[in-house]
Amino acid sequence: MSEAATPAAPRRSRLVVLLPLFLFGALAALFWSQLDGSDKSRLPSALLNKPAPGFALPALDGLLRDGQPVPGLATADLRGRVTVVNVWASWCAPCREEHPLLLELAKVPGVRVVGINYKDQPENARRFLGALGNPFAAVGVDAAGRSAIDWGVYGVPESFVIAPDGTIAYKQVGPISSEALRGSLMDAIRKAGQRG
């Protein structure tokens, strides 16, 4: 009886040793597959090519641009021209990184850049824009984060290109990079302008 039990013990001990190695290999393969070079900043969105969600957000109190109060933001403001909607917050480090590129984008003729200030303190948001510059023609305050949910926002920053007909033409997840500004984002802006 003891002779029959001995061969099973080595098999079981090999299995105990090989199982963690197999699991490690499977996890390594999964991680490696995620590093395939595709653009992770452009995630599919159920809202692409559909009308922007309905919303009406109040203005950021006390925010001025060229001496005039910056208005809030509503769905109706997104029609008639190509608009880039940027969801941002003062507490967001990647928002600070992308900010110079938003200032550059705001200078592009025919493009209107607007912001949705996400779950932020008004004084912090004003201080952020005061220190870094204000690229936004309008800023809507989404204090509770409800509008961001309607837009399908995963986290800040995120940007959306809205065609003149009010439909979402492109979604950028994460900060805008120089490459995106000169590549995929600008291509999306051009194509959205053609949809008129």
Image (spheres, rainbow, N blue to C red):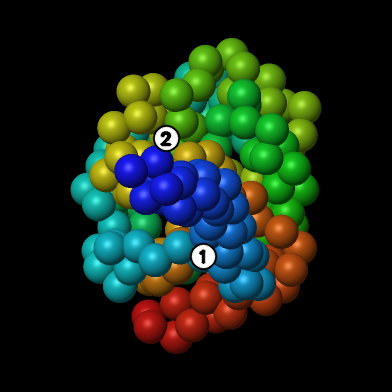
Q: Which residue is mark 1?
A: 42
Three-letter amino acid code at disc 1? Answer: Arg
In 3D space, how far apart are the residues under numbered discs 1 and 2 (Cα atoms)? 24 Å
Determine if residue 180 is in view: yes
The quarter holding residue 195 reads bottom left
Q: Is residue 1 left or right of residue 31?
A: left
Q: Crowdedness of circle 2 by 10 Å Cα count: few (<14), some, many (20+)?
A: many
Say which residue appears at 70% left-offset and 47% top-offset. 98
Q: Which residue is mark 2?
A: 140
Q: Nearer the viewer, residue 132 or 92?
A: 92
Q: Which label sits in the foreground, 1 or 2? A: 1
Q: Crowdedness of circle 1 by 10 Å Cα count: few (<14), some, many (20+)?
A: some
Mark 2 element type: strand
Up-down relation of residue 66 to residue 158 (above or below): above
Say which residue appears at 40% left-offset and 71% top-offset. 169
Mark 1 element type: loop
Three-letter amino acid code at disc 2? Answer: Gly
